[in-house]
Amino acid sequence: MLIKACIKSRQMIKLIFMRYIIIVCFIILSAIPLSAQETDGNDLKIKIALYGNGDILFSWWGHTSLIIEEESADINSSYDFGIFSFRNNNFYQNFIFGRFLFSTVKRNAQNNINRYIRQNRDVTIFTLDLPPEKREEIRQLAEFSILPENRYYYYNFFYDNCSTRIRDIIDIATEGQFKLQFSNEKYHYTLRQQARLHTWVSPITDWFLCFLMGKENDQPITFWEAMFLPSELANSINNFNYTGENGVTRKLVSDTEIIYKSQGRYAVLDVPEKLWPYGLIAGITIAFILFLLFFMQEKHPAIGQVVSGITYSLFGLLTGVIGLILFFSGFFTDHEFTHYNINLLFYNPLILVSVPFGIKYAIAKDYSRRILSEFVLRFLWFLVVLGIIVSVILKLFPGFWQDNFHHQIILLPVALIFSLEPFGLKKLARQIKMRFDKKNA
């Protein structure tokens, strides 16, 4: 009996042990993502989601994501490139210096789509017609991009964003045919013009972003480069045909589904809005107001002197700070789109010198004590006029072309009034000549 009991106990222990091994193996296998297992691609569907423009500045240009559906496992995954969080370490410092550390995130596709619908943004889904082995290749590339060592990368608005990463994946899946076709076609807009199609809704933001862009953003580009915009990527894949391994030409997009149309959202322009008429009107209006201030100074010298001096300081401060931002971003940050900016010729930080001289001008007790301040102020603004003239001449040379006429035309009338205002210019010239003659007598 004792022997039988021992044998039975051993059998029970063995059975429990085998069950334990089976449970452990099941847990381990369940923990392995299905997408990490090898597939032949037959049960995969590859889709591109295009999301329209949103309310916040960084969402004005839309978004795009890669969707992979695995029918056998009932898994729909969305791979989003260009994702960031304000909670990242040193986010604001990195933002200032142009070191945008973004990441790739894998989400549930339907939840992701619902999130954009709640934001009242257009949602359009494009299904791609690719052979099974290419679908599997895209799945592997997508999974590779979310690995911890590959997930984070430095974002570039024009050259490495949510749209360009998906563009590059499509090119790999079509054996380079996608890039071959679109990198040889000249696009009808520059990077600056293309970006401005989405910023017209806020004139001040449009003006400032355009002001920060250097001349490199005005060079001719191809359709391939234009696909930094999600909408242009969508247009390109929708019009693209490629040749498969069997030599048969097929359309890349097999189906287009409009999931949601936004309500009451502003439209994206087809043609960039011209800013120079608004710049001209603003420049002339400001110059006319300044003209009235200097005219008042002739009629009411005491009050006019104080108002004019303060005006010199305020305009010098505003123009100088803008120039300082441009100088800093162009030389000390990784914001590549701000580099080589000709606007620095006339929005020069040197104009900040006019702030203390404007104050001295305002508080001078008599004319003889304000001559130096007035001369320095007029000279500084005359340098601005010369900078604008030089920047216009540079437009004659293709390598120096920059679409900044609206920035030149708004500042030119103001700089002319500050530097060549006629009411006090003759008087200043006489006083300087008298002092010079007296000194040499």
Image: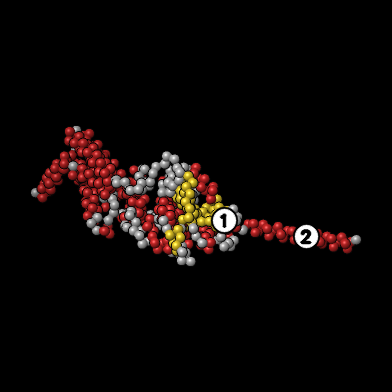
**Left or right placement of residue 96 versus residue 137 in this view:** left
- Residue density around tag 2, few if under 14, some if 14–19, many if 20 or more, within 10 Å: few
Whether residue 169 is visible, yes or no, is: yes
Q: Where is residue 331? Give x, y as percent.
A: 34, 56
> Does the residue at mark 1 contact the one at mark 2 (Cβ under 8 Å)?
no
**Left or right placement of residue 18 versus residue 235 in this view:** right
Residue that carries the numbered disc 2 in the rendered image: 15
Residue that carries the numbered disc 1 in the rendered image: 70
Q: Tag 2 or tag 1, which sits nearer the N-term?
A: 2
Q: What kind of residue is marked 1?
A: Glu
The N terminus sits in image quarter: bottom right
Q: What kind of residue is marked 2?
A: Leu
**Left or right placement of residue 325 versus residue 116 in this view:** left
Q: Where is residue 119? Give x, y as percent.
A: 47, 43
- Give me the C-alpha separation between circle 1 and circle 2: 37 Å
Front-most of residues 270 and 78: 270
Q: Quadrant of residue 37?
A: bottom right
Q: Residue at x 58, y 60 (%)?
A: 36
Q: Residue at x 48, y 62 (%)?
A: 173
Which residue of the protein is positioned furthest toward the bottom in this rendering?
246
